[in-house]
Structure formats: C-alpha cells, structure tokens
C-alpha cells in the first residue's frame, strides 16, 4: 500500500519546494491548495497518509479549522507551517494537537529532517506493553489504554507520557522534559509542557493524578 505525506499550502511555489525535498528522500507526496481540498484528499486516502504538513493561512478553510476536523477522527502526525512567529500561536497549535511547529521562512532541509524524525518515532519499537497502575502503554502499537479502554493521544502527548512513566518517581524539570521529548533545539516557552500535561491528565481521567506537579521544578509520575 502506498503511504503519503500530504502537503497543504496555498502557494504552489512552497508546495513544490517541500515536495522536491521530500521526494528526494523517497517519500510519496499528495498536495492540496486550500483547507477544503485538504480534507477531501485526507478522506479519499484514509489510512494511507502518514503525516501532514499544514499551512495556517489559507483560503476557504484555514489550517486551524483543518486541524480541528482531522483531530476528531485521526491522530496522524501534523507539522504546522506559519508565517507568524508568535509564541501564542505556537501554544495554540500545541493545544489543538500539532506535533511540530515551524515558522516561515524555514530551511527545507530542516523540515525534511523533522519529517524523518517524526516518522521514525511513529514506526514503533520492539513489542513491549507496560502497565503502570492501570495505564497500559503498548510501544509497538503506540497506544495507551486506561483500565482496558484505549485513549487517543497526539504523538507529542504520547511521547511525554512515556517519558514520565519511564522516569517514574523522578522529579523532571521542564528544561529536561523539553530536551528529551522535544528532541531538537526548542526556543519556545516551557508553558507548552504545561498545556500538554493538562490534556494528558484530562484524557487519563482518575489516573491523571499519577502525574504530580513539583512546584518550582516540573513534573513527576508517581503511583501512590
């Protein structure tokens, strides 16, 4: 089965630039020039799209609207592109379930590297299921279940939860979390972590209490 990267941008020049770099890396590309077309292409290729590169400012439907609709049914990794470099936009994107966030102008080589890194992380690892107080993490399937019921986490939420669980009973600073979960030079605000923790706790329900806030430091996963 062919698997694709969907590139969504209203500028044909930008789509070609991204496509050329990714095709050179061996990826198959689908394109959309606006938000409505992006949703059509996504639905027509259900299960075949491995990652989406999504521009914010587009005609008909903007990137935020596309993101919201896709997140209702899918946790496919999404890299958001924007001409705005504002921190608040970045936090907003992470709240909605963006996995990576790149501001224009950017290096196509860096974008291609981010795509490769995300896809490697989502390919899974050797079969391993870890049970932590009723939170079951299947690393091969990249799924999380709470008391036997699977919950939907974005790629970044999943990686953050796994990192906390693998460092159970250890107080982790926000800087350490950024360095290990956002595993590249990240210049944004550490409040990004707080927003992700809030969403993870909500999705874990009563088990969310296992993620402790350590005042002045960061967070700790502890079952007591």
Image (tube, rainbow, N blue to C red):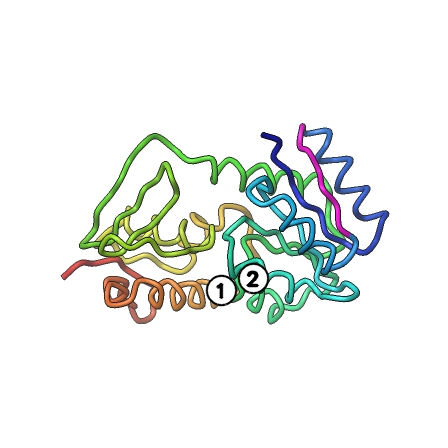
Residue 194, percent across and down?
42, 67
Cα separation, mark 1 vs mark 2, equals: 8 Å
The residue at which mark 1 appears reads as: 192
Residue 116, percent across and down?
58, 36
Taking the spot 59% from the left edge, 39% from the top edge, the residue there is 48
Taking the spot 61% from the left edge, 56% from the top edge, the residue there is 101
Toward the left, the furthest residue is 224
Disc 1 + disc 2, Cβ < 8 Å:
yes
Query: In what element is the residue under mark 2?
Result: loop
Left or right of residue 111, residue 150 in this image:
left
The residue at which mark 2 appears reads as: 188
- The stretch of residues the image draws in magenta is 26-32
Quadrant in the picture for the N terminus = top right
Residue 186, percent across and down?
55, 54
Residue 126, percent across and down?
34, 30
- Using the image as rendered, state which of residue 158 and residue 173 is in the foreground: 158
């Amino acid at each position: 089965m062919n698997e694709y990267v969907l590139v969504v941008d209203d500028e044909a020049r930008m789509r070609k630039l991204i496509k050329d770099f990714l095709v050179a890396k061996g990826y198959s590309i689908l394109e959309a020039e606006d938000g409505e077309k992006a949703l059509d292409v996504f639905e027509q290729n259900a299960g075949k799209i491995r990652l989406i590169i999504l521009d914010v400012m587009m005609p008909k439907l903007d990137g935020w609207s596309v993101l919201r609709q896709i997140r209702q049914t899918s946790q496919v990794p999404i890299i958001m592109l924007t001409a705005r470099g504002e921190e608040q936009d970045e936090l907003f994107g992470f709240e909605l379930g963006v996995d990576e966030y790149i501001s224009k102008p950017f290096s196509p080589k860096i974008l291609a590297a981010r795509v490769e890194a995300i896809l490697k992380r989502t390919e899974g690892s050797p079969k391993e299921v870890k049970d932590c107080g009723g939170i079951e993490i299947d690393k091969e399937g990249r799924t999380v279940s709470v008391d036997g019921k699977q919950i939907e986490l974005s790629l970044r939420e999943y990686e953050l939860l796994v990192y906390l669980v693998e460092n159970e009973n250890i107080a982790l600073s926000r800087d350490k979390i950024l360095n290990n979960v956002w595993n590249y030079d990240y210049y944004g605000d550490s409040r990004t972590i707080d927003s992700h923790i809030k969403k993870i706790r909500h999705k874990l329900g009563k088990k969310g209490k296992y993620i402790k806030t350590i005042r002045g430091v960061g967070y700790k996963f502890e079952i007591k």
